[in-house]
Image (tube, helix red, strand yellow):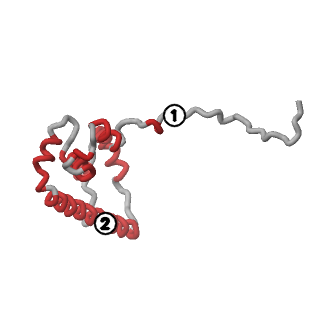
């Protein structure tokens, strides 16, 4: 919100995906629209918060990268598995560590990770409409 003027070309450069073919309609809908000062103030506040969060994410990523330096060989080994990227490898190592001998088999590791159903995860069918009628004290037959 540094400028009061509207640049249609800059606006078009921000569009992507399915909206890109409709860029002329987007520019036409924005042209001539004015934003109230209170709205501008809120936009500036939201943008400042977004900038703060993005900086925090960059700092957190840098901290994580520094912490995982001793585990680079394990990370690269995990990354050799199809579908496992660096972030997934770091998450796996942070969850189970590098010593998987605590799991007696790959099946137990998968169960611990929640990747295989256990006996308790099978669907249980119950008759939800069954009525429980308590026995009366007198035996009627």
Residue 87 percent coordinates (x, y): 21, 48
Q: Quadrant of residue 129?
A: top right
Horizontally, residue 44 falls left or right of residue 99, namely: right
Query: Could you classify mark 2 by the number of other residues whose Cα lies within 10 Å: few (under 14), some (14-19), or many (20 or more)?
Result: few
> Disc number at residue 41?
none
- Please name whichever residue, 47 or 58, is drawn nearer the observer in this view of the structure: 58
- The front one of 111 and 19 is 111
Residue 131: quarter of image: top right
- Asked if residue 69 shows in the view, the reply is yes
User: Looking at the rendering, in which quadrant would you find the N terminus?
Assistant: bottom left
Give how far apart the Cα atoms at labels 1 and 2 are: 45 Å
In front: 1, or 45?
45
Instruction: Give residue 141's position: percent from left, percent from top.
Output: 88, 29
Q: Give x and y (percent) for residue 108.
A: 32, 39
Quarter residue 130 falls in: top right
Considering only vertical position in the picture, is 64 above or below 9? Answer: below
Residue positioned 22% across, 45% down in the render:
100
Q: Residue at horizontal 40%, vertical 70%?
A: 38
Which residue matches tag 1?
Answer: 123
Residue found at x 38% / y 57%? 33
Mark 1 / mark 2, whichever is N-terminal: 2
Q: Answer yes or no: is residue 13 visible.
A: no
User: Judging from the image, what secondary structure is the residue with disc 1 in?
Assistant: loop
Where residue 104 appears, as percent x and y from the top left, is 27, 40
Q: Which residue is located at x 55 percent, y 34 percent? A: 124
Q: Which residue is mark 2?
A: 49
């Amino acid at each position: 919100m540094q400028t009061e003027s509207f640049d249609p070309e800059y606006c078009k450069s921000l569009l992507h995906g399915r909206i890109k073919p409709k860029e002329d309609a987007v520019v036409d809908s924005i042209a001539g629209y004015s934003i109230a000062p209170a709205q501008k103030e809120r936009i500036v506040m939201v943008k400042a918060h977004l900038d703060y969060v993005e900086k925090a994410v960059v700092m957190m990523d840098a901290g994580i990268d520094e912490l995982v330096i001793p585990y680079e060989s394990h990370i690269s080994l995990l990354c050799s598995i199809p579908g496992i990227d660096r972030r997934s490898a770091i998450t796996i190592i942070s969850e189970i560590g590098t010593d998987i001998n605590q799991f007696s088999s790959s099946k137990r590791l998968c169960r611990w990770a929640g990747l295989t159903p256990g006996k308790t995860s099978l669907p249980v069918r119950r008759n939800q409409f069954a009525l429980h009628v308590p026995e009366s004290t007198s035996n009627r037959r």
